[in-house]
Image (cartoon, rainbow, N blue to C red):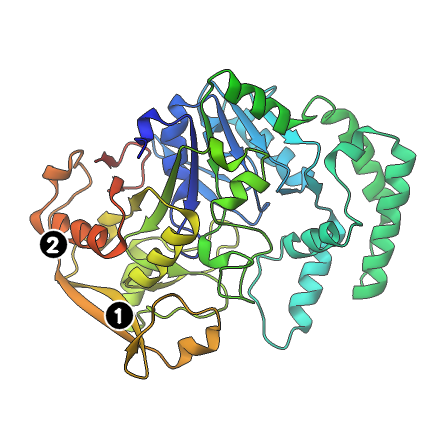
Amino acid sequence: MTRINDAQVIVVVGAQWGDEGKGKIVDRLAENMDFVARGGGGANAGHTIIVDNKKFVFHLIPSGVLHDHGTCIIGNGCVVHLPTLLDEMNTLREAGIDPKGRILISNRAHLLFEHHILADKAQEEVRGEKIGTTCRGIGPAYEDKVSRRGIRAGELLGDFSSFTKKLKENIEYRMKRHGFEMDVPTEINLYKDFADLFQETIVDTSEILHESISQGKKILVEGAQGAHLDIDFGTYPFVTSSVTNSAGACTGTGIPPNKIDFVLGIIKSYTTRVGEGPFPSEVEGKTGKWLQDKGHEYGATTGRPRKCGWFDCVVARHSQKISGIDAWNFTKLDVLTGLEEIKIVTDYMLNGKTLSSFPADISVLEDIELETITIPGWTEDIGKCRKFSDLPENAQKYCQKIEELTGAPMSSIGVGPDRDDLIFC
């Protein structure tokens, strides 16, 4: 297996239900990267990085932008809300970081408009069983994409009268279907300004990435959400609208599978889920609230509280299989400090038999029993640990047990919120 430090093309994927802490490790790995690319999702992502006690939250811009080198790419698999992107770019400028020339958008990426956001909200309100979407317009934008009426970023740079006609038709379709009203001329004028503003930003990013690989440049593809929100392999229908496993790095950027050298899976030292849908390892009551508060488990995109539970090996093993994960970045180990005992979910049992994999039919999850083991906790502060041997013995044993039960080694361990609070194994 290629070591992560020797890899030219690295893919980072979430291995739970998102919110695993991908932004932090992407930020650290980006120190040595020429490109950091997003391959799926949109402004429903919320990647948080803390540098010198200053918090940055990115929804569209890849998390490598805080370094003074390298190019950030929003790939063809993303859906891009240009007003949100512009706001993020302005936030960077206010922090003294000039993003000009360092952020590129694929000309094949689909644009996400205000009518998608309004449609998302309308659809969620009328559903009998809510999905728990972020209401950022992601689903309707992907719906337009697969229905072949979507508008790609490259079209903004072409004949604007043709762009206007298509946008007007799409807005009218959504208004009629969902019963809302929009100021169509104002929306069109906004994108007329964007056509000039993003003239040099919208390019053929797949060609740039291919050339860069042939030149030996280093590329990191940053996943959004997590494997159990994947449109095919997640807890359907409580999923997002894109491919969130490692395959999405290929379809969402144009990088072929045989060019990927290393897949890094991100797993939290416990498990969380925001929104609706099944969550087998959830811990309610005092311990669940303790994890939520100590871990600051509130969505970076929506602010919604996340449900918390014990580490779920069935979830992790499923993600490892479908993404071909080579190693783990194990995040938020410090949050567990102070617990007298820590449980790990090892298997799901149904009618007295161990399930061989995570069930495709989520109704099965209503009848399963959880097989768990208990690991003694630790009370020592681990925030300043920088070597695995610095960790308390019980913390080391916990990490080793996770490696044993998931079948993949740990590449790094998060021991605090700052970008430097990491142990590299």
- Which element carries disc 1, helix, strand or loop? helix
Label 1: few (<14), some (14–19) or many (≥20) C-alpha neighbours in 10 Å? few
Q: Quadrant of the C terminus?
A: top left
Give residue 390's position: percent from left, percent from top. Answer: 11, 38
Residue furthest front as drawn: 258
Give residue 357's position: percent from left, percent from top. Answer: 37, 65
Type of residue at label 1? Lys
Give residue 388's position: percent from left, percent from top. Answer: 15, 38
Type of residue at label 2? Trp
User: Is 259 rendered above or below residue 406?
Assistant: above
Residue under numbered circle 1: 286
The front one of 23 and 406 is 406
The label number, if any, that marks residue 378 in the structure image: 2
At horizontal 17% and vertical 36% (from top left) the residue drawn is 384
At horizontal 39% and vertical 66% (from top left) the residue drawn is 358
Q: Is residue 19 visible?
A: yes
Q: Do callouts 2 and 1 mark residues in contact (Cβ within 8 Å)?
A: no
User: Is 129 rendered above or below residue 150?
Assistant: below
- Classify residue 201 as left or right of residue 164: left
- Which element carries disc 2, helix, strand or loop? loop
